[in-house]
Amino acid sequence: MSLKSRQFVSLIYLMALPVIWSIVGLVFGYSSYKIYLPLWILNVTLMIACTWTIGKFNSIKDNQDKLPNARIGALFIIPFMLISMFAGLGEPPFDNPSQWVSSATEQRVRYYFLIVAGVLVALAFTLLDHELKKADEKFYSTIGSLAIKLAIPIFLFNQTYFGFYYTRLSRLMEEADMAKMPDWAIPLSSQYYYSDVIVSALVYLGTAFFVASLKRKGWFTKPASNIYIALCVFCLLVDFLPGIFPKPWIEPFSTLNFFVSIPAVPFLISYYMGINMLRKS
């Protein structure tokens, strides 16, 4: 198979993966680690091979001027190598303390991975901001960088809440034979709902400004940039408006609001940006 054919197959594989993971996670839910770990390791191996192939790293020595874009693109993709494991974990069992406790190690790993993913995304955007400033594009990238820098610390703190505090709370609920969250914990839980909304909104906003910066420099085409920005604006509105105007919200807006504020989802647009940057490298 020629390099061009391998790049095309690799591109399709990386682009289709988030859809495949979501379907598998929603349809099959939680599965044994004996099943999902080998599949996850295989998937990570394939993702690494696809990333390498699309970025043409085997000939990168002859394209040193394009190396920074390739590295940044790979950094946007790497977090989803970790996140792909969630397809085997299914949804977090928030309404089932005993199930959360029985799978506590896996739930913690879920949020460990999200913490690492947040750090890698922040690093990728920081490097991208540096490259854009070197190319004399400072206005949009500065605003985008500020939004990401505000979002990531809150994001990391939120993941420690679910990974550690909620695990301890679930153990206390199980020991007390409580099926529902105690009243004293509800206000804190509500606070984290709104902080998730803020984090998602800032990530969508920052991503949109970075895309505008890439568009301004001609690093992304106008049609691709407009699609990215439109997606960011749509997700921003669907994420933020229900927090300002209380429920009930009619379908499909209620479901969309839930989906766009899932911790890993705001990073999806930067994931596809990374694939595009690799392809252009």
Image (cartoon, rainbow, N blue to C red):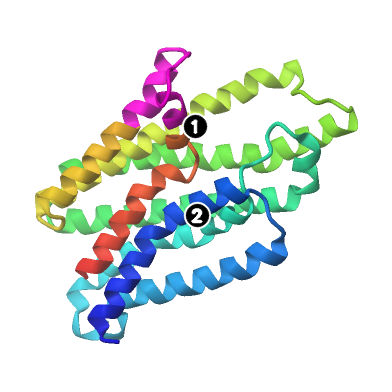
The secondary element bearing badge 2 is classed as helix
Q: Farthest residue toward the front?
A: 27
Residue 83 makes an appearance in the image: yes
Q: Nearer the viewer, residue 227 or 187?
A: 227
Q: Is residue 252 magenta?
A: yes
Per the rendering, the mark at residue 196 is 1
Q: Identify which amino acid the numbered label 1 is placed on.
A: Asp
Camera-nearest label, 1 or 2: 2
Residue 94 at x, y percent in the picture: 68, 34
What residue is rendered at 67% in x and 50% in y?
30
Q: Which residues are magenta?
A: 236-258
- Left or right: 207 in relation to 13: left
In this picture, is 201 found above or below 35?
above
At a point 26% along the width and 86% down the height, the residue shown is 2
Quadrant occupied by the N terminus = bottom left
Q: Secondary structure at mark 1?
A: helix
Label 1 or label 2, whichever comes before in sequence order: 2
21 w.r.t. 46: above or below: above
Q: Quadrant of residue 58?
A: bottom left
**Which residue is denoted by mark 2 in the rendering?**
21
